[in-house]
């Protein structure tokens, strides 16, 4: 048993991974190491990983690939996929088999184990780990501009929806659709929200749709019928009732971003043969890369 | 007047640009300099060019950005936007104001001049030129595998369609949709066609949809109602009659790729203020980059 440690909330990517690895941190990573990128993890057999990389290259808004295993089977060394970020800057000393707080395991597309602490016994010499960007970073930027997303103000999960927007196919990954996250803003705030999030190109960037017509264009009929996360709220914590909001001059409107659930859905849909490993929802891999390292100048 | 020259069909990018520049070549560039990349040209005021670059980064399948002016107003020097291709390799000694055979000019989103030989008098110190990939290269690869596209076999233009697939918005470029090019293949050939074109990531890559259901999913109701190019044909030159083809076991099915008309449409839709310059359709900029330089390994 490791001795009790004094770290409460790790303040760097390195400390976060250490805490996950020695089991002093087994909770969601929300709030850990502010300013450091947190990544979605997907581990795939090498043939599927190659197709998946192309899926990311073709659909960078919902699937922004940050880094990948340096070679098949390598759980320690990563290659950066972000221009201007060196390989060394991704995650020094990482062991991807232990450094997320919790993992899920899929066999032939079916979930077989949930929230396990390490995946050493599932790791194969043909496995390739892929790290994908997520939207925490632009939420901090919005907060800094007094546009904190309503779900953050109310300590809830962001609301997520399936859309009708097709992913560009890549090898075995066919028929996937964009998943989006949604945040409510006043109609008059939308341009500012777009401007602030535009530079976050490796973490979904600016919104892909907004407003009530925009919502219907991407195949979402009702905000109240969401697919993941918590029910949508306004900044004051009030539940969103679409019929009350819609049509108000400068009322609240939904704003939609590409979402990191998209790649996970694509993998599930593809029923990838063999063992696939993902982080358990919310239990991300915290990197050494800082938000300002990946901003588009 | 330049003396008559002996070049018939230029065999390199450099020769192609020289022939366009000294007016010995004023025709479409189809068939010029086999193996060299040909690019779509869009010249925009710098503020719009910045948004347009993000549009390309977010929608790389229909809008694969190859290179851009080294700085505002620079018509001679280009920065490569393709990983692994150096700036020097783009187009040595280019003058983008003269080196496409023909240009079109738009003012505030309206076409004001067509098929002019040079654009020196329209060039502004705030202009940025952007070069975007096109699908010639993967057509050569298909031909090499005995899968020559039907329109090439029959010396016609490829057939193009508007779709319902939204582009991810970027700054002033909002509400754009994918344009696709279409080539008919036997159902049994589709996987081979996908495999061959997959590596051509900077020139639209593998198809985004195929088959009759795939066609309807992207909002195309009838192959006979096309938006650009020539009417679709089969390999033997027969016109495509959808009602006769649809449902045949191993009959011909439509296969759709992202298309370089997409960025032009996005620019038109945005009604970009000021002077915008494009190549005249078919009259492309031929680069020094060769097809094998941009293949995904």
Image (cartoon, coloured by chain):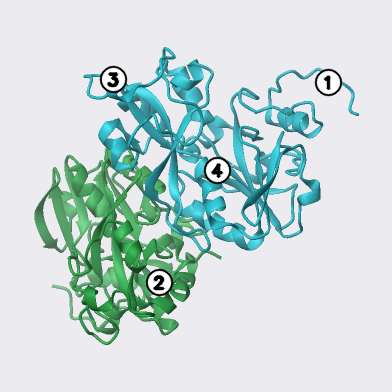
Chain colours: A green, B cyan
Q: Mark 3 packing: few (<14 Cα in 10 Å), some, or many (20+)?
A: few
Q: Which residue is mark 4?
A: B84
Q: Which of pointers 2 and 4 indicates the residue nearer the eye?
A: 2
Dot 4 and dot 1 within a common chain = yes
**Mark 1 belongs to chain:** B
Quarter of the figure with residue B197: top left
Q: Which residue is mark 2?
A: A138
How many numbered discs, if any? 4
Q: Which of pointers 4 and 1 indicates the residue nearer the eye?
A: 1
Vertical order, A36 against B4 (above or below): below
First in sequence, mark 4 or 3: give its number.
4
Q: Which residue is mark 3?
A: B244
Please tell me whether mark 2 sits on a helix, a strand or a loop.
helix
**Mark 2 belongs to chain:** A
Q: Which residue is mark 1?
A: B5
User: Whole-Å distance between the Cαs marked 4 and 1?
Assistant: 35 Å
Q: Residue at x 64, y 60 (%)?
A: B273
Q: Nearer the viewer, residue B258 or A290?
A: B258
């Amino acid at each position: 048993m490791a001795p009790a440690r004094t770290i409460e909330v790790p303040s760097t990517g390195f400390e976060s991974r250490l805490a996950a690895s020695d089991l002093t941190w087994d909770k969601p990573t929300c709030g850990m190491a502010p300013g450091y990128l947190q990544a979605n993890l997907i581990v795939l057999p090498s043939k599927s990983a190659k197709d998946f990389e192309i899926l990311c290259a073709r659909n960078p808004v919902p699937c922004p690939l940050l880094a990948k295993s340096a070679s098949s089977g390598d759980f320690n060394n990563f290659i950066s996929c972000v221009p201007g970020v060196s390989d060394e800057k991704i995650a020094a000393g990482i062991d991807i088999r232990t450094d997320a707080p919790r993992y899920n395991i899929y066999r032939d597309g079916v979930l077989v184990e949930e929230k396990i602490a390490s995946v050493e016994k599932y790791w194969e010499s043909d496995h390739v780990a892929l790290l994908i960007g997520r939207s925490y970073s632009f939420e901090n930027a919005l907060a800094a501009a007094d546009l904190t997303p309503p779900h953050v103000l109310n300590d809830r999960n962001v609301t997520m929806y399936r859309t009708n927007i097709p992913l560009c196919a890549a090898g075995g990954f066919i028929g996937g659709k964009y998943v989006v996250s949604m945040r409510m803003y006043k109609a008059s705030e939308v341009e500012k929200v777009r401007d602030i999030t535009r530079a976050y190109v490796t973490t979904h960037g600016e919104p892909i749709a907004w407003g009530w017509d925009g919502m219907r264009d991407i195949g979402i009929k009702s905000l109240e019928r969401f697919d993941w996360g918590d029910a949508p709220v306004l900044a004051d914590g009030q539940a969103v009732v679409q019929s009350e909001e819609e049509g108000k001059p400068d009322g609240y409107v939904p704003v939609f971003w590409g979402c990191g659930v998209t790649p996970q859905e694509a993998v599930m849909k593809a029923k990838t043969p063999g063992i696939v490993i993902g982080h358990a929802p919310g239990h991300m891999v915290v990197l050494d890369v800082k938000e300002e390292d990946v901003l588009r100048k």
